[in-house]
Image (spheres, coloured by chain):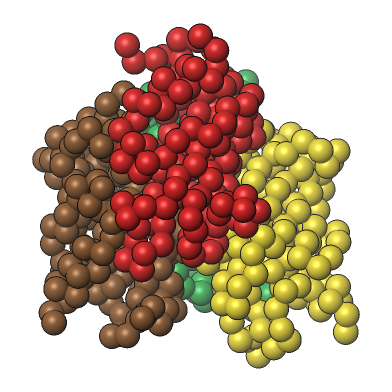
Chain colours: A red, B brown, C green, D yellow
Amino acid sequence: MGLYEQIKESFDKQGLMHSLNAHLASVQDGEVKVACEFSAGVTQQDGYFHGGAITSILDSACGYAAWTKIPEGKEVLTVEFKVNFIKAAKANKIVAVGKVIHAGKTLMFCEGEVFDETETTVLAKMSTTMIVIAKSV
Amino acid sequence: MGLYEQIKESFDKQGLMHSLNAHLASVQDGEVKVACEFSAGVTQQDGYFHGGAITSILDSACGYAAWTKIPEGKEVLTVEFKVNFIKAAKANKIVAVGKVIHAGKTLMFCEGEVFDETETTVLAKMSTTMIVIAKSV
Amino acid sequence: MGLYEQIKESFDKQGLMHSLNAHLASVQDGEVKVACEFSAGVTQQDGYFHGGAITSILDSACGYAAWTKIPEGKEVLTVEFKVNFIKAAKANKIVAVGKVIHAGKTLMFCEGEVFDETETTVLAKMSTTMIVIAKSV
Amino acid sequence: MGLYEQIKESFDKQGLMHSLNAHLASVQDGEVKVACEFSAGVTQQDGYFHGGAITSILDSACGYAAWTKIPEGKEVLTVEFKVNFIKAAKANKIVAVGKVIHAGKTLMFCEGEVFDETETTVLAKMSTTMIVIAKSV
């Protein structure tokens, strides 16, 4: 099974991604994109994307970016992340791009950005630590 | 309208809280609780609560805790948060408790904790900065 | 050698603590205090404690708090930290209190607070991840 | 007085920068570099640069980068920062590069990187929120 297929299989098990109507947009070595169309189910009180929805797809994008760097039989879990919200997320669609900045044997440091549908305006940025562990059966 | 009712009205406009099946559990001066029952719609790939779902209810709990400290006609937005994930969130229910640690005129510093259904085991912790702005009409 | 002596020996090797004129104030299981008197060598541009000085003693306090929880032959390194600055640090002395919140085998999650000389007013808070590694010879 | 001179004057008032033997290396619109030669006064227990020293010059670099974007009569203070430590800082010299990512009227979001003397290997990264306030007299 190719890398995209492995990640797609895992992504599809994330019930939260279904609730958000998010999808795996692309998988490259060290970089994964997750996109999410606007819907009533992702909003905060003013009708924009909720910070929690933004963070959720950032977390998945960074986690799967880390996944592209690990040996078979391993998986990654999020240790911590920080998100800075830069602009109100008034958009028809948001795209999270997660990238591996440093891949250690035990820990990985990744960064992510969320763009609006133009993929040029940055709405939020994540920095995160992932830990590599043996895969749950 | 009392403080609980005001916050409940705003909370109910957060479509994301509906998607997660989360509810406003309590409102006190400087402290708000948001709870979320386990469902297939909140999971990560191993079937536990997704970090994004945990973060979403933490963000709402901290945001509404900040709300209890602001004058009428204002609202709060999240500037940034950091979450540390302490234990895998295998639970039937999670409860986020958001608290105001310091309330300035422009910025508020809040902290949140997510517990499992026993409300004693801490699964994750948030530290966050909120900004007070004029309410969107 | 007792725990205090071990930590004191390591602390004294931290040249930065000497530059800041900081000292190890107390060592308990899971909690360490580091104090720093005000001097011209710790200031920012307005003459208060610099955020970097505040962070430095927080980092040492949290690191040595983690140290109290590890087996012999190991040491801890800082993976990441976040600091929120709550009040301007106009004080004659600051005291950092670092505490272990969760001690895993590989990672530890700690929190720290910096107080002014009254030890009641919180000036800044840290949340941090430490990693347990084999001791450098 | 030009921008470099204004920032140099403020930088020179930071007693901590003197204690670390750090200097202002360059000032451009939205980007400031601060460098620090290795000395016994900046170390942690294994003789490398202490995370607190790394953070101190990152904070100053980001703060002065923000300063290049504010009107006269204002100054910036650090609200919060997060630092991820990527590699042990065994180096003869470290260079912090602070950059403004988004400049709002009240808040600025900046990022910083610390390099070793080659200015190619990243040792640590900062993400930080600054607030614009009226200058202290």
Q: Residue at x 68, y 75 (%)?
A: C45
How far from the left and from the top, in percent, is residue C92? 51, 73
The quadrant in which the C terminus of chain A is found is: top left
Q: Is residue C116 visible?
A: no
Q: Quadrant of residue B3?
A: bottom left
Q: In the figure, B31 relative to A32: above or below?
A: below
Question: Residue D116, percent across and down?
Answer: 79, 40
| Residue at 85% from the left image edge and 59% from the top image edge | D25
- Compared across the picture, whether A40 is left or right of C24 comes to left
Q: Nearer the viewer, residue D25 or A72?
A: A72
**Count of labels in the image:** 0
Identify the residue at horizontal 70%, vertical 78% (top origin): D70
User: At 50% from the left edge and 50% from the top edge, which residue is drawn?
Assistant: A94
Q: Is residue B26 visible?
A: yes
- Judging depth in this view, the residue of A110 and D40 nearest the camera is A110
Q: Is C56 left or right of B116, judged from the image as shown?
A: right
Q: Position of residue D101 (x, y in %)?
A: 67, 60
User: As displayed, is residue A134 above or below residue B33?
Assistant: above
| Residue B76 image point, x, y percent | 37, 72
Observer-nearest of A57 and D27 = A57
Which of these two is toward me, A123 or D27?
A: A123
